[in-house]
């Protein structure tokens, strides 16, 4: 007898049920990693890691992006929206009442966002100020957020100013890029790099903050249509950063080591 469509487990469950793939999804849940880093974290040979990454990519749960710092390398990232959609669909497939709402809410009025976050990119003129502004905006002013660069530009890129103003109603026109050295002595819970180059040179900060990497292409890269202030790559970069910010917020509202999923089940 041929099983009905309902008898076949949804794709997210079929893929995530494997121990290695679950580890890969878990490691990629907060930041982007290269294959050799996943090999070290998961403890499996590179050919095994590559095989399982290929399956996750074929389902759209994981994507790869060529490193802008070293074109021979690729960063793998979790497609958070796709995972949320497929996970929600898995509940619905079992019973309509188990439908999940995939998009995480912005910080509610009663949430205490106590984490301090530093966003870093090379010039501190596009990606990192966009991330800083969006996290501050979505956290409702209850997050300690900063951004800086290893080689700051003279001014914030007009494309970053324009996309934040047009899409989110945020004005950073008066903001000026700053150097990482200006933050010496400050404590951060999270240091998040947004460009592949600065990830390699970002200094250590006191109290051992959690280091995450989001491999976001430079919207102002030379020779790209995005070098224009209204270029579409600023729209794409801001949208991707905003998605990651929305999924970061629930992490920031829970202390380190506290699992909100476990808390909800207790």
Image (tube, rainbow, N blue to C red):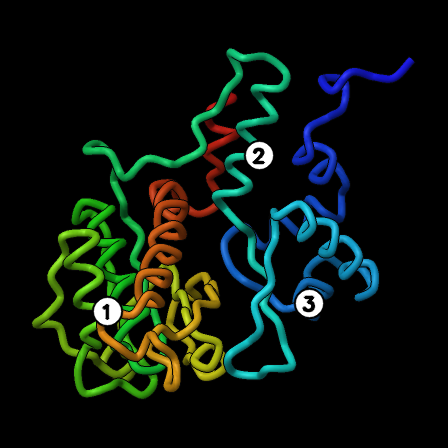
Q: Residue 168: horizontal and vertical position, in percent?
A: 19, 51
Residue denoted by label 3? 35
Comes first in the chain, label 1 or label 2: 2
| Relative height, residue 233 to residue 69 (above, below) | above
Residue nearest the viewer, comparing 256 with 58: 58
Q: Residue furthest front?
A: 225
Comes first in the chain, label 3 or label 1: 3
Residue 230 bears which disc, if any?
1
Quadrant containing the N terminus in the rendered view: top right
Residue 118 bears which disc, if any?
none
What's the distance in space between the residues labelled 1 and 2, CA to CA? 33 Å
Q: Residues within 10 Å of mark 1 (few under 14, many from 20)?
A: some
Task: Report the residue at 57% width, 27% height from top.
Answer: 89
Residue denoted by label 2? 86
Q: Residue 48: horizontal and vertical position, in percent?
A: 82, 58
Q: Residues within 10 Å of mark 2 (few under 14, many from 20)?
A: many
Front disc: 2 or 3: 2
Task: Report the residue at 38% width, 41% height from top.
Answer: 250
Q: Is residue 142 left or right of residue 10?
A: left
What's the distance in space between the residues labelled 2 and 3, CA to CA? 24 Å
Q: Residue furthest right?
A: 1
Q: Residue 4: horizontal and vertical position, in percent?
A: 78, 16
Front disc: 3 or 1: 1
Whether residue 123 appears in this view of the structure is yes
Whether residue 266 appears in this view of the structure is no
């Amino acid at each position: 007898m041929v099983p009905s469509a309902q008898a076949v487990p949804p794709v997210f469950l079929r893929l995530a049920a494997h121990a290695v793939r679950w580890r890969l999804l878990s490691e990629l849940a907060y930041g982007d990693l290269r294959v050799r880093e996943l090999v070290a974290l998961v403890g499996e040979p590179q050919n095994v890691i590559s095989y399982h990454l290929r399956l996750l990519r074929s389902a759209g749960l994981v994507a790869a992006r060529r490193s802008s710092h070293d074109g021979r390398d690729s960063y793998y990232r979790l497609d958070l929206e796709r995972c949320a959609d497929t996970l929600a669909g898995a509940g619905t497939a079992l019973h309509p009442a188990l439908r999940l709402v995939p998009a995480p809410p912005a910080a509610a009025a009663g949430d205490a966002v106590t984490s301090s976050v530093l966003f870093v990119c090379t010039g501190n003129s596009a990606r990192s100020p966009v991330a800083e502004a969006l996290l501050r905006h979505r956290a409702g002013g209850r997050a300690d957020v900063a951004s800086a660069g290893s080689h700051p530009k003279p001014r914030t890129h007009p494309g970053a100013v324009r996309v934040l103003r047009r899409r989110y109603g945020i004005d950073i026109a008066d903001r000026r890029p700053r150097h990482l050295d200006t933050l010496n002595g400050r404590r951060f819970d999270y240091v998040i790099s947004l460009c592949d180059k600065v990830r390699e040179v970002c200094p250590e900060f006191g109290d051992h903050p959690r280091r995450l990497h989001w491999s976001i292409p430079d919207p102002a890269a030379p020779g790209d249509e995005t070098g224009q202030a209204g270029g579409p790559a600023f729209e794409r970069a801001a949208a991707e950063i905003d998605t990651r910010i929305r999924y970061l917020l629930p992490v920031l509202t829970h202390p380190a080591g506290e699992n909100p999923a476990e808390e909800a089940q207790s």
